[in-house]
Image: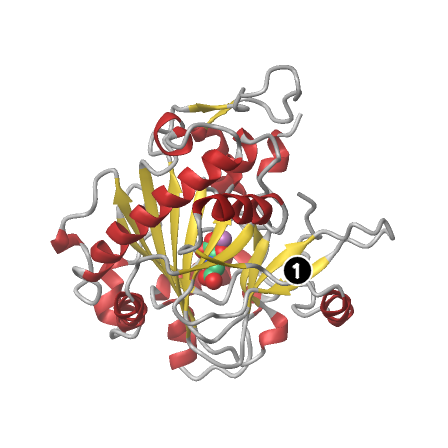
Amino acid sequence: MATTSASASPMSSDFDRLSELKAFDATKAGVKGLVDAGITAVPRIFHHAVPAVDLKNCALLIILNTVVPVIDLAAARSELVAQVKAAAETFGFFQVINHGVPDELLAETLTSIRRFHEEPAETKKPYYTRDKTRRVRYECNFDLFESPAANWRDTLFMKMSPAPPGEEEVPSACRGIVSDYTTQVRRLAATLLQLLSEALGLHRGYLEHDAGGIDGLEVVGHYYPPCPEPRRTMGTTGHSDPSFLTVLLQDGIGGLQVHVDDDDNDGGDGGWVDVPPVHGALVVNIGDFLQLVSTDRFKSVEHRVLAMAVGPRISMACFFKTHDRCRVYGPIVNSPGDERPRYKTITVEEYVGYYMDRGLDGKSALEHFRL
Ligand code: OGA
Ligand code: NI
């Protein structure tokens, strides 16, 4: 997919960015720590060059009536396959209702993430780490030292599958709840991969079983504190997801946007469309691995989260992917002769290594592997 220009601020010689990053990281208190300390200006390490809101594009997209679809999973199967197919081929994003995950569990999950982030700094510190081998991590910007500009966001990361952390490893604020939630979302992800397999003309179990699309699960519970200067920074820089499929739970604050391409050939590069909070809904998006194996039929679309004056905003993303880093992914061959490969055949390790080394910089990681 097309990507917008990097949202990084140029390196400036008049401040020692690395020292400031290190000093901030050493607090182990995240962005929430800055806000609690009463800062009224966004520190330079968080400054982004691109304005967060593009009014011209907003107007254009309202005229084009561009809306991320909401799909009712209670509809008849044949209709569902068609709706999911259309959404996966265009926006790469849709919301689902009647998905089977109870409303109370959605609410409890968001509350538990908020509870963790609002614990005293001393309680959270033991979880703060940049050691990517730990299954439970409290981190402020996984790519703090790699990306060109930091995001106004703290995160609780948990690797839930194939081997979930022991209950004692999970912070008490989330104990029991995140595991219940992810069990239910995994069932939903299996249903969605069945629909997507059918939409590709494959047997129902292909993406789940043959491609291992939900063998691995990593979850991130984000906390976006209110920001004193939201136009200077971003909640999450534009990126596409390093997953097969992502299921996202967001609260009612808003700020999530997806990028839509501009098809009218006027030289514009499209614009950003809101993914408005819909009570009880879950947001679903296609990840880079599914775009790769489907040879661009399904779109892993760039998305971002604006920094907001209001908040905190809470969200929880479940990244479904294979757990096997040695697994090789290339195009699915289901209609011989009709497609030439568009991506290199790569291992998961190669892709994830590239994604992590670079951090979020506003460009699609998948493009790096395009032939
Ligand atoms: C992500 C992501 C969106 C959100 O974690 O990859 O896009 O609303 N999150 O927090
Ligand atoms: Ni994402």
260 displayed left or right of 246: right
Residue that appears at 60% across and 30% down: 295
Question: SS at mark 1?
Answer: loop
User: Where is mark 1, residue-wise?
Assistant: 9
* Amino acid, disc 1: Ser
Foreground residue among 99 and 184: 99
| Colour scheme employed for the rendering of this structure | secondary structure
Foreground residue among 150 and 66: 66
Q: Quadrant of residue 213?
A: top left
Quarter of the rendering occupied by the C terminus: top right
Tell me if residue 222 comes above or below residue 254 in the rendering: above
50 displayed left or right of 287: right
Tell me if residue 97 comes above or below residue 209 in the rendering: below
Q: How many marks?
A: 1
Residue that appears at 68% across and 62% down: 66
287 displayed left or right of 97: right
Q: Residue 97: x and y, percent?
A: 42, 61
Foreground residue among 45 and 354: 354
Q: Residues within 10 Å of mark 1 (few under 14, many from 20)?
A: some
Which residue is farthest left? 168
Tell me if residue 140 comes above or below residue 206 in the rendering: below
> Does residue 260 appear in the picture of this structure?
yes
Tell me if residue 193 comes above or below residue 105 in the rendering: above
77 displayed left or right of 216: right
Q: Residue 260: x and y, percent?
A: 68, 54
Q: Residue 81: x and y, percent?
A: 50, 43
